Image: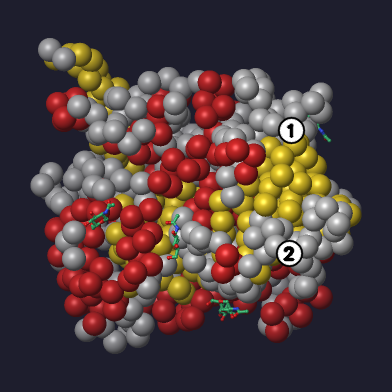
Amino acid sequence: MLHYFRLDRPPPLLGLLCLLPTFARAQITVYKQIPLGQTATAIAAGAAQTTLPAYDATVLIPPAIPIPPPATAYTLPVQRDAAAVQGLSIPHVGGGFFGFSVEMSVINQVLGKNSSLLQVPFLNLMANIQERAGSVLVRLGGNTQEYAVMVDTLPDGHTIAKQRATIQQTTETPAVEYTVDLFYMASNISSFVNVNWFIGIPFNDSTNWRLAIAENAQTIIGDNLLGMQAGNEPDYYASHGIRAVTYGPYDYFGEFSNLITTISQNSLIPRKNILIGPSLASGDWMPEQVWDTGFIPAFKDSLYALTILLANPTVIYSLRYICSYPNNNCFAVFGVGAPQDPQENFKDYLTHAAGVNMVRMYLNSTAIAQAAGKPFIMFETNSATCGGFPGLSDSFGAALWALDYGLQMAYSNFSNALLHVGGQNVYYNPFTAPLTNQSTFNQWTIGAVYYSALVMAEAFSTTNTSRTMDLWGNAANLYTPSYAIYENDVLSKVALFNYVDDRTGASDINVAITIPGSTVPASVKVKYLESESVSFKNITWAGQTFGGPYEVDGRLRGDLSIVTVACDQAANTCNVPVAAPGFALVFMQDITGISSVGQASLTFSTTVRTSGGTATVDPVVLATSNGHSGKDRALVGSTSKGSIPDSACRVAASRNGRGLILVAVLWAAAAGAIM
Ligand SMILES: *[C@@H]1O[C@H](CO)[C@@H](O)[C@H](O)[C@H]1NC(C)=O
Ligand SMILES: *[C@@H]1O[C@H](CO)[C@@H](O)[C@H](O)[C@H]1NC(C)=O
Ligand SMILES: *[C@@H]1O[C@H](CO)[C@@H](O)[C@H](O)[C@H]1NC(C)=O
Ligand SMILES: *[C@@H]1O[C@H](CO)[C@@H](O)[C@H](O)[C@H]1NC(C)=O
Ligand SMILES: *[C@@H]1O[C@H](CO)[C@@H](O)[C@H](O)[C@H]1NC(C)=O
Ligand SMILES: *[C@@H]1O[C@H](CO)[C@@H](O)[C@H](O)[C@H]1NC(C)=O
Ligand SMILES: *[C@@H]1O[C@H](CO)[C@@H](O)[C@H](O)[C@H]1NC(C)=O
Ligand SMILES: *[C@@H]1O[C@H](CO)[C@@H](O)[C@H](O)[C@H]1NC(C)=O
């Protein structure tokens, strides 16, 4: 049905002929900022909206009401006790389920310019997750981590920059250069909001390891550093020309082993057991091929977690099978693969099958990780490779999709998933920092999937006991998925979706939650994730919003709206309506008061201080946040110039007896930022 979710291998010959694209990275992003205090040249917001994907205003046509439509009223039996539920997930521990993966090349844009110039909206966005989940996971890395080099200083007080490289350098990834200040920046962020970090150890050269990033991260970030990724998408090393064409899982095993030995001899890296691998992108290797090398028993004691990257769900279909299963926006961005019609693809995201089929191929691996006692993390993901789809990736439909996908991963015993954050050149960002030259009048822009992260954080709360069950209610209808969440072994929340888009109200559903062998509470509280259409970008969570494009400072605004639904205890039912489209989080208990959380109590206020568009943190907050006194220090938020979709692409078409084969060479803007 969803042909692009199929896992079938292409016919062997076609697979061979279907050459993977050779990636090369060239510096496109300009990191120079307009110096603080100088007047930026203003451009019209409208101009940027039509230019840059992050501000793309495309509104798709909502998919038609499915035929047959889902039943609009159904009874959902949900067990009260976890013990009565077969197949419940393992408990979710620490931090909201969704964290964020920030490509090194956009750190300046998103986190801040340096340790004394942090992005205030970023702090607010993290504070809102922290308020719900206790902490937030942020990964600094991506393809650019492989060639990263630490340098003593960078011009203009920058913490990170890309080495200059020309577009002709097709085989060499330009190095990211960073200074020790990168770690002070991370550490300073963690002193305001409880962000826990992942970094990546450069893996381009396994003979001369460059471990400065590990040494400094451990020393400076301390316990807020959770793990160090060793190898990013090693299954692409051969096809990307980073290793010999024969490079396979055993070669990766050998290099991992070598790294462990090197770290064991390095006294500047005290915590030797927080490595992360294998971070496959399911390019040429299945995870099982790595498990079959004995990776887990050999390295268990050095590992923090096992990871895979679905460097966006469709990467598997786009890169591995680029000729046979093209589903990505690579054609629009790079001219590779087949043209994709976001409008046509939209309906494939608006079904429970999307998440279920994405996750299915990893069930063996999550079970293997569980047996090994290791977290299994989706280290990088988003709605579609090559930057997402216009009108789709930033829609309410994408928010519903990501929420269902996240709950499905949790149910499938994934520990966390990190949503990828790119620059202005992608459609799927959870949040986008403004271009410096717009910063006098524009602020940040929120993306649909940030709302999904917020809701997931709230659904799982801070108890470290949340376990998830896919209920397959409404006769397993794919347009009305439902989940139960148990905390401390008792039913805590019920999550209800309605993917149908029908503004007449005729497809709104009514879910009669019932608790077999027990009694429903007298009333339940419900929070809704809402928009009038799956196509719209204006989303509210419990009545609150972060605002429209360029309006976001990371704080929720509007009145918190929590609906109280009176239940019928005699009939043992709570009737919860869910609009078409819509999502409801039903709080079956409210012991912790978590349902009343709106805007985080910890806030950082943004005030335009100069025409350069700087922002300052409220000194009151500085003085009280996380016990850290910042009274003596002005924390100034900076804005920085974004990455520009200045990518070039060459597609060479060659013919052989079997048909047209695309041999693509990509010059990807902002390197992995777009993956
Ligand atoms: C603003 O920045 C963008 C990206 O760097 C650039 O394309 C645009 O020309 C700039 N506008 C002005 C008026 O400088
Ligand atoms: C939950 O787990 C995190 C990470 O292990 C820990 O920091 C936190 O204290 C735990 N919270 C509770 C309530 O046990
Ligand atoms: C690895 O990357 C570093 C920094 O960019 C570079 O100096 C070195 O030559 C690279 N080594 C290999 C083997 O590619
Ligand atoms: C951060 O950048 C500002 C502005 O360029 C500079 O004044 C400051 O010294 C820098 N801070 C650090 C820690 O490098
Ligand atoms: C913040 O960064 C500065 C370096 O610019 C460093 O001296 C200071 O210790 C950092 N503060 C924290 C809490 O990490
Ligand atoms: C799970 O993975 C292991 C290790 O590669 C393999 O031996 C086993 O056959 C796999 N099981 C399934 C059901 O795929
Ligand atoms: C998740 O782990 C639990 C506990 O081992 C197991 O019962 C359940 O079947 C797993 N879920 C999936 C979808 O594999
Ligand atoms: C949401 O956005 C759509 C499309 O731009 C618009 O028609 C609608 O009025 C907006 N709704 C609200 C409540 O702002």
Residue 554 relative to residue 265: left or right: right
- Judging depth in this view, the residue of 77 and 297 nearest the camera is 77
**Residue at image x 29%, y 25%?**
323
| Element under disc 1 | loop
Residue 518, label in figure: 2
Residue 268 sits above or below residue 81 on the image: below
Residue 523 sits above or below residue 191 on the image: above
Residue 72, label in figure: 1
Type of amino acid at the residue the image marks with label 2: Ser
**Which quadrant is home to the N terminus?**
top left
- Judging depth in this view, the residue of 265 and 12 nearest the camera is 12
Sort mark 2 into few (<14), some (14-19) or many (20+) by Cα contacts within 10 Å: few
- Judging depth in this view, the residue of 340 and 87 nearest the camera is 87
**Residue at image x 62%, y 52%?**
483
Quarter of the image for residue 295 reads: bottom left
- Ligand 7, by image quadrant, is bottom left
Residue 525 seen in render: no
Quarter of the image for residue 304 reads: bottom left
